[in-house]
Image (cartoon, rainbow, N blue to C red):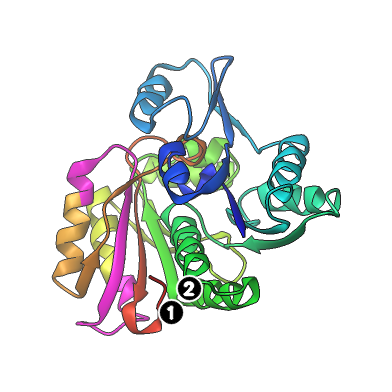
């Protein structure tokens, strides 16, 4: 079985090679120059470019042709393909993959809309790799990926709303009003439709970070054993603050901090802090 993903999973090109996963990069353009997310620019270098840029960055999905070429090439080795992608509620990547799959009838392609992004998508990709190595069928893997989707919640906050406003993720008027008042949202990525929803608003970035564990308590009681992973857009200090706040409330099994990739960071800017959580008892056994 072959596994395909996109760079919205925030797995580097090298990580994907080690996993045996084919990664199709999303693209980002800064001041007229194009980069492939996860391939030819690091997140840290990208945020430096954003800070100096004269215009807002632009992003684009892998093309239909890139998907078709990848599927055709992989099908020559194994017609069974599992293609796992960033939420269709946030990107057109999944829909492009669906179109491409219809153009490659020689392949047996199962498509997964992860309904999340970054490390949340990465969890599903890594689980698929582990399960395939254990010899599970594609249908069995799809069932377990759905269990991971249902168990997983993603929250994030950020110190500056201008990129979300520019990208249309927050309405221009509401975003400007919040910025003027110094109000910052804590945003949840819904695992029902894969879109962003404001959960609370706080009057400082620090208060927004501290609100995240309290939101998680709405689903998981204090002391719950959680699998947790922080996603950071080049802000290790705030990442450490969120980790400390989480450890006061839950028993966390921490995965390494993930750097928010360029294609996603283009819509948030430097400083985003997010967390992906799931109760360990609700996750299927994979490795």
Q: Quadrant of the C terminus?
A: bottom left
On screen, 11 above or below 33? Answer: below
Looking at the image, can residue 226 be seen?
A: yes
Question: Can you identify the residue that label 1 sits on?
Answer: 284
Image marks 2 and 1: residues in contact by CB distance under 8 Å: yes
Residue found at the very far front of the displayed protein: 77
Q: CA distance from mark 2 to mark 1?
A: 7 Å
- In screen coordinates, is 42 left or right of 1? left
Q: Nearer the viewer, residue 236 or 113?
A: 113
Could you tell me residue 214's position as x and y percent?
A: 28, 72
Q: Which residue is depicted at the point 76% across and 44% down?
A: 72
Looking at the image, can residue 11 be seen?
A: no
Q: Nearer the viewer, residue 106 or 48?
A: 106
Mark 1 crowdedness (10 Å alpha carbons): few <14, some 14-19, many ≥20: some
The magenta span reads 214-239
Quarter where residue 156 is shown = bottom left
Q: Quadrant of the N terminus?
A: bottom right
Could you tell me residue 178's position as x and y percent?
A: 43, 47
Question: Can you identify the residue that label 2 sits on?
Answer: 148
Quarter where residue 202 is shown = bottom left
| Mark number, residue 269 | none
Q: Secondary structure at mark 1?
A: loop
- In screen coordinates, is 208 left or right of 262? left
Q: Which residue is depicted at the point 49% across and 69% down?
A: 131
């Amino acid at each position: 079985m072959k596994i395909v993903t996109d760079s919205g999973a925030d797995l580097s090109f090298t990580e994907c090679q080690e996993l045996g996963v084919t990664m199709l990069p999303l693209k980002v353009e800064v001041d007229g120059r194009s980069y492939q997310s996860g391939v030819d620019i690091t997140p840290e270098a990208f945020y430096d470019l954003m800070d100096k840029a004269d215009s807002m960055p632009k992003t684009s999905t892998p093309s239909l042709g890139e998907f078709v070429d990848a599927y055709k090439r992989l099908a020559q080795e194994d017609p069974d393909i599992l293609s796992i992608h960033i939420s269709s509620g946030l990107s057109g990547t999944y829909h492009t993959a669906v179109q491409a799959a219809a153009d490659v009838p020689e392949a047996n392609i199962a498509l997964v809309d992860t309904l999340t992004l970054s490390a949340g998508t990465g969890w599903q990709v890594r689980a698929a790799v582990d399960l395939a190595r254990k010899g599970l069928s594609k249908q069995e893997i799809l069932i377990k990926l759905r269990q991971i989707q249902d168990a997983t919640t993603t929250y994030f906050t950020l110190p500056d709303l201008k990129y979300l406003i520019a990208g249309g993720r927050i309405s221009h008027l509401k975003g400007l009003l919040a910025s003027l008042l110094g109000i910052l949202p804590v945003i949840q990525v819904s695992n029902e439709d894969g879109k962003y929803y404001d959960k609370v608003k706080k009057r400082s970035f620090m208060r927004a970070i501290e609100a995240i564990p309290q939101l998680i308590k709405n689903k998981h009681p204090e002391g719950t054993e959680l699998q947790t992973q922080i996603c950071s857009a080049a802000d290790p200090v705030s990442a450490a603050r969120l980790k400390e706040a989480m450890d006061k409330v839950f028993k966390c099994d921490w995965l390494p901090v993930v750097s928010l990739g360029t294609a996603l960071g283009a819509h948030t800017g430097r400083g985003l802090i997010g967390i992906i959580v799931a109760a360990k008892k609700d996750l299927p056994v994979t490795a």
